[in-house]
Amino acid sequence: MTADDVDAAFEGTLRPSSLTEFIGQEKVRTQLSVMLSAATMEGRTPDHVLLAGPPGLGKTTLAMIVAHESGSPLRMSSGPTITHTGDLAAVLSSLSEGETLFIDEIHRLPRGVEEMLYIAMEDFRVDIMVGKGPGATTVPLDIAPFTLVGATTRSGLLPAPLRDRFGYTAHLEYYEVPEIESVISRSASLLGIALEPSAVHELARRSRGTPRIANRLLRRVRDYLVVHSSAGSRDAVNSALTVFDIDDHGLDRLDRAVITTLIESFRGGPAGITTLASAVGEERDTIESVVEPYLVRVGLIARTPRGRVATPAAWELLGKTQPSGL
């Protein structure tokens, strides 16, 4: 079994299977519940759903819940894997009536695929091109009514015609510490980990408002407790997070590398996101979608028209004095 398989099995163990089990995102849960209940009562396929927000907040879990609450099978795919219209046509034509299709990273679909998806979402039809050149013809193919659940971390990249075809758009927000505490308590109970309330709070405080990170850190804490035969105290959590390079602010190695590079190599900025990513040896998408949103949220960097800049709080974090005039 690969590391990815182990991670998937671990996440699957902790995923809630219904809206009542899902913690946080109260407004989204209420709205989804109304929409799905109405569709069930009227005996129709639920409207298409777009889930937007930073990574790790539960978009994939909510897609699974939409299928579960609708009593329908779930088909999973992602934008980067659907590279041609033929790929999408093959998926759509194989869907059964009422099935839920989940497309992660939907903003990464090629333009031609997006255009085919417009028609499929609205008219439950795909147009298949038969032949090549002047003799090519288009053959319409009816497909079974389905519910599309799209997930995106960058909703601004979705073209308006695609966004407009979703009947409901949910914007997921970062979690507050008490909500993350509830997530950790539930996960710890499922995994048989005994943590003191102060330990749960400490872990939640450093989880960046993200359930996925909270569960990942909980897993590392569990490893530490097993190896050291420790009780689940706050001191044990602190020691475990120190071992795994998570500081008191919840920043990891890459977060600190971005801040340090911005200050030491670019005098606090401004620096372009591509230049910054190259300087720390990481992909631009990772910096832009994973690292930057949290650093902006906690006030350590700021976006400007000329690039990213370190805030006074970032200079203070590194124990450095910000040059006058910056």
Image (cartoon, rainbow, N blue to C red):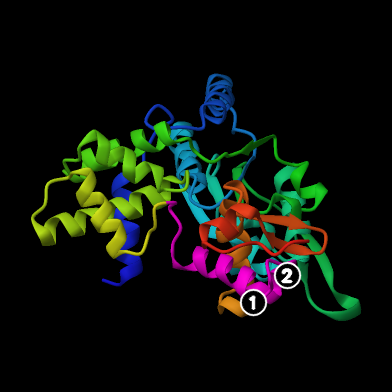
The answer to whether 229 appears left or right of 101 in the picture is: left
Q: Residue at x 25, y 57 (%)?
A: 240
First of labels 2, 1 by sequence position? 1
Q: Is residue 251 magenta?
A: yes
The answer to whether 202 appears left or right of 326 in the picture is: left
Q: Given the current orientation, which residue lies at the most extreme right position? A: 134
Q: Residue at x 28, y 36 (%)?
A: 185
State the mark number for residue 271: 2
Q: Amino acid at mark 1?
A: Ser
Q: Amino acid at mark 2?
A: Ala
Q: Secondary structure at mark 2?
A: loop
Q: Which residues are magenta?
A: 249-277
Q: Quick one: 192 or 222, which is closer to the camera?
A: 222
Asked if residue 218 shows in the view, the reply is yes
Q: Given the current orientation, which residue lies at the most extreme left position? A: 229
Report x, y in % for residue 73: 45, 44
Figure check: 40 above or below 237: above
Q: Secondary structure at mark 1?
A: loop
Report x, y in % for residue 211: 42, 45
Report x, y in % for residue 176: 48, 35
Q: In 3D space, how far apart are the residues under numbered discs 2 and 1 (Cα atoms)? A: 10 Å
Q: Quick one: 195 or 159, which is closer to the camera?
A: 195
Q: Residue at x 16, y 43 (%)?
A: 192
Q: Quadrant of the C terminus?
A: bottom right
Tag 1 residue? 265
